[in-house]
Image (cartoon, rainbow, N blue to C red):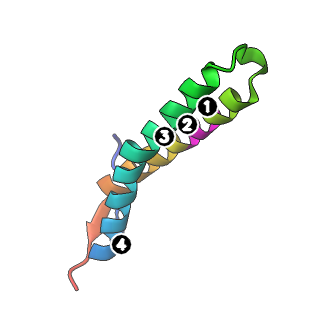
C-alpha cells in the first residue's frame, strides 16, 4: 500500500477508526453476506432488487473498509 499523507489523531479518534474497522469487517460483512444469501433464494438474480441492493451495500462496505485501512496505516496518534 502506498504511503499517503499522515493524519494526526487523538487516541480516542484513532480508537474510533479501529473500532469502526472491526465492526465493518466482522459484524457488517456477516450481515450483508446473510442478506445476499437470502436474496439469492428469491430466484432469478437478473430481476432481483433485493440482491442488487445487497450487492451495492456490500460494495460500499468494502470501499469503507479499504478507506479505514488506509486511514489507520497513515495515522499518527498525538500524545496529549
Residue 35 is drawn in which quadrant? top right
Q: Give the number of the disc on residue 34.
A: none
The picture places residue 9, in percent across and down from the top left corner, at: 34, 72
- Residue stretch in magenta: 55-60
What is the secondary structure assignment of the residue under circle 1? helix
Asked whether the viewer can see residue 5, the reply is no
In this view, the mark in front (4 or 2): 2
- Mark 2 vs 3, N-terminal side: 3
Question: Of the numbered discs in the image, which one, if any, rests on residue 58?
Answer: 2
Q: Are marks 1 and 2 in contact (CB under 8 Å)?
A: yes
Q: Which quadrant: the C terminus? A: bottom left
Question: How many numbered marks, from 0 up?
Answer: 4
At mark 3, the secondary structure is: helix
Label disc, if present, on residue 55 of the rendered structure: 1
Tag 2 secondary structure: helix
Alpha carbon of mark 2 to alpha carbon of mark 3: how far?
Answer: 10 Å
Answer with mark 4 or mark 2, whichever residue precedes in sequence: 4
Is residue 26 in view from this perspective? yes
Marks 4 and 1, how far apart in space?
30 Å
Split into 4 quadrants, where in the image is the N terminus? top left
- Work out whether mark 3 precedes mark 4 in sequence or the reverse, and give the earlier one: 4
Check if mark 4's residue and mark 1's residue have beta carbons within 8 Å: no
Amino acid at each position: 500500500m502506498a504511503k499517503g499523507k499522515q493524519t494526526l489523531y487523538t487516541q480516542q479518534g484513532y480508537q474510533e477508526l479501529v473500532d469502526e474497522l472491526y465492526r465493518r469487517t466482522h459484524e457488517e460483512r456477516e450481515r450483508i453476506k446473510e442478506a445476499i444469501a437470502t436474496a439469492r433464494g428469491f430466484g432469478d438474480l437478473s430481476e432481483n432488487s433485493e440482491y442488487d441492493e445487497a450487492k451495492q451495500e456490500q460494495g460500499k462496505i468494502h470501499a469503507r473498509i479499504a478507506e479505514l485501512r488506509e486511514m489507520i496505516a497513515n495515522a499518527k496518534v498525538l500524545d496529549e
